[in-house]
Amino acid sequence: MIVLHVLTSLALGGAPQAVLTLAAAMKSRNVRVAVVGPVGPMAARFTEHGIGVFTAPTDRLCRQAVRDVDRAVQVTGPDMLVSHGKGAAFCSDRIAERRNIPHVRVMHGLHHERYTPAGRWAYLAWERRLARRAAALIFLSHADAGEATDLGIVARHQRVVPNGVDADGLVAAAFDRRSARAILGIPDDARVVGA
């Protein structure tokens, strides 16, 4: 089996890190995995694990993103598309229909509250449509699944799969203070304020 994960970000942490952890486990079960998303630092980590990386501006709703994801589909020949995020879902939905490939959406929360009333209505209508067309929805928490159901975002198949975190891997990958400053180009004597 070949799975292509379509991400809206290849930034450090978050969904890309969860997909990397999942992809490494899938590889051990002889599932071939590739990812596609915007240029970002996680691309190198995927490559280090032998996971193919393709670039596409999936952080935007645009034709170029759909074309670039479709190219990744043509190269990898996936049995399944798994999307993470709105732009990724937009691309995956169109390609899944065109190429007759199952599309599984991983819902990393709903963020409708930040839209105007008209924008919220349009966003939720779009989410409902994508949910009906998806082969399955995966929610990362029961709270997210409940909120989606209350908003009418349902699919034929839905599951809650809590997001796992490889705590040992995070500790092992953590940088000491001096290394982190060097990577970020911050002098040792500079004051840094942040979270």
Image: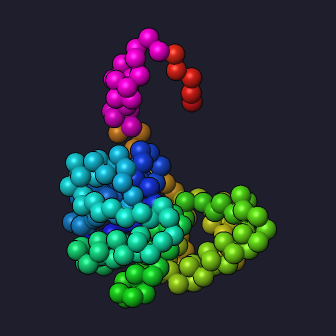
User: Which quarter of the rendered picture does the C terminus lie within?
Assistant: top right
Out of 194 and 151, give the one closest to the viewer.
Answer: 194
Task: Residue at 71%, 58% (x, y): give it.
Answer: 114
Out of 183 and 139, give the one closest to the viewer.
Answer: 183
Task: Residue at 40%, 66% (x, y): give it.
Answer: 6
Q: Position of residue 96 (x, y in %)?
A: 41, 82
Q: Is residue 7 above or below residue 195?
A: below
Q: Position of residue 78 (x, y in %)?
A: 29, 76
Residue most extreme to the right: 117
Which stretch appears magenta?
170-190
Q: Is residue 46 above or below residue 26?
A: above
Picture quadrant where residue 170 is located? top left
Whether residue 4 is visible: yes
Q: How has the structure been colored for display?
A: rainbow
Residue most extreme to the top: 189
Q: Position of residue 193 (x, y in %)?
A: 57, 23
Task: Residue at 24%, 61% (x, y): give it.
Answer: 52
Q: Position of residue 95 (x, y in %)?
A: 40, 81
Out of 15 and 92, give the one closest to the viewer.
Answer: 92
Picture quadrant where residue 92 is located? bottom left
Based on the picture, tell me whether residue 131 belongs to the magenta stretch. Answer: no
Horizontal side of 171 relative to 73 (left or right) equals right
Based on the picture, tell me whether residue 173 belongs to the magenta stretch. Answer: yes
